[in-house]
Amino acid sequence: MTVYLVGAGPGDPGLLTVRGAELLAAADCVVYDRLAAASLLELVPPGTELISVGKAPGRVEMDQEQINATLVDRGAGGRTVVRLKGGDPFVFGRGGEEAEALAAAGIPFEVVPGITSAIAAAAYGGIPVTHRGLSTHVTIVTGHEDPAKGRTDVDWGALARAGGTLVILMGVGHIAEIARLLIEGGRPADTPVAAIRYGTRPEQTTVRATLATVADAGLRSPSAIVVGAVAGLDLAWFESRPLFGRRIVVTRAREQVSGLRSRLEQLGAAVIELPSISVEPLEVAVPPLGQYEWLVFTSANGVDAFFDRGLEPKGLDARALAGVRIAVIGPGTSAALARRGLRADLVPERFVAEALLAAFPAPDRAGARVLLARALAARDVLPDGLTARGFLVDVLPVYRTASATPDPANLAAVEAGEFDAVTFTSSSTVTNFCAAVSPLPDPMPLVVSIGPVTSATAVERRLTVGVEAAEHTIDSVIDALVAALSVPQAPGPADAAG
């Protein structure tokens, strides 16, 4: 039995340490606060006990004594307990108090450091906390001391005289008094100040001021406040990303969403997952493949279901396809095939069924057979067209799509129109999205479609397609989003001077 005090970092889930991710994947119980990225909870195994102990202004789910007691109780039960904390557990995270409680109870514990917002928020705001010629040291201090102490341990005058960079956490509510004391202590009134709110998150904002003006700069919590010459630097990178601050709704199935979400987050977007479909592989009996000239896949889902479920329990061996030619629609399907060690013989230039049908060669002989592995419900363009060309076509349903149950909070945000764009990657995502979201936002934000068939379904549902991907690929969907929603870049020195 061990309790792990794990630092989750300041918000960007990519800043979680490898050790932290390993422990979440093995946890029996996770006790988490509101500052830890919610997506990190997706790393925990099914059935893990999740206990929220978040604190927010005016609302406390558990006070610190109750949190300590919870950790002791769960730790004493012989379970792997992860205490997931925003930032670093030992940098104003009260991890020391939790460790003391565990030690007093004889509960083994381990501390897994996290990246503190004092460093990360500044870095994501384009501010190095130390910089040659400007600052050789950094001091991290709280701007909100425990009122129960009845005294202050922070000597702001001494900190003013110490120079260097000062990073103030939890100081927004007292910034006017703090700035006054620093000026009285000897810091020049024109000392640069930068406050990074929600540092490392897509909603990050940076406010710049000086000690003389910061009290009236409209700072809001939670912010990391950087004081010193380095705060005058603006090495912006995070807030300059092309989709920074944009809220994008992703409607792909949960099984497919991770790659698209990761790409969008790397471009600066906040992703709202509203999977409108779920992919359910079917138990299928694959007929003898030697009787077929062609095997056709219309999606990556079809490839995965065919090989994983084709000959349960071991799956289908690729050697069974010796002598069979393979046709696919689109590079995503081709890539799924390549992961199985196979190469497609035919991929049309356009990634729709009509293009594959047009590119399909004539039968080599009378009675040539085609096996079409696809969804249970799909258009009949291919089977009807190939039959008309003289092939004998067997349709093998290998998966089906079903409506997914959306997260209530995400659904509410979408119905309120709190997003900039929604992406549709198939007709079924359109149909099920419109069934789940009622009423649709008015006006509807940007609708991005993966291709003409999906666009046609959107139009049938009275949606206006703002952008259609040039190619039927996820990469092309992302390119279309960037082109439509790119954050305008600030002018460089030469442009500003002109």
Image: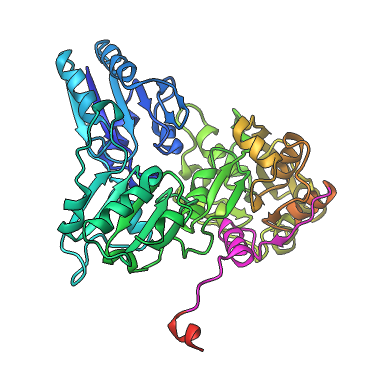
Left or right relative to 464: residue 474: left
What residue is at 66 percent from the left and 34 percent from the top?
400
Q: Position of residue 102 (x, y in %)?
A: 20, 18
Which residues lie in the magenta part? 462-491
Left or right relative to 76: residue 248: right
Q: In the rendered picture of this protein, how many numbered marks are placed on residues?
A: 0
If the image is split into quadrants, where does the N terminus sit?
A: top left
What residue is at 51 percent from the left and 89 percent from the top?
498
Q: Position of residue 460 (x, y in %)?
A: 84, 48
Left or right relative to 36: residue 150: left
The quarter of the displayed image where residue 31 is located = top left
Which of the two residues, 28 or 240, is positioned nearer the viewer here?
Answer: 240
Kindly tell me whether residue 360 is visible in this rendering: no
Left or right relative to 383: residue 172: left
**Looking at the image, residue 378 lies above or below residue 189:** above
Q: Position of residue 52 (x, y in %)?
A: 42, 24
Magenta stretch holds residue 317: no
Which of the two residues, 224 or 408, is positioned nearer the viewer here?
Answer: 224
Colour option used: rainbow
**Looking at the image, residue 77 lies above or below residue 321:** above
Magenta stretch holds residue 475: yes
Q: Position of residue 396 (x, y in %)?
A: 67, 37
Which of the two residues, 221 or 416, is positioned nearer the viewer here?
Answer: 221
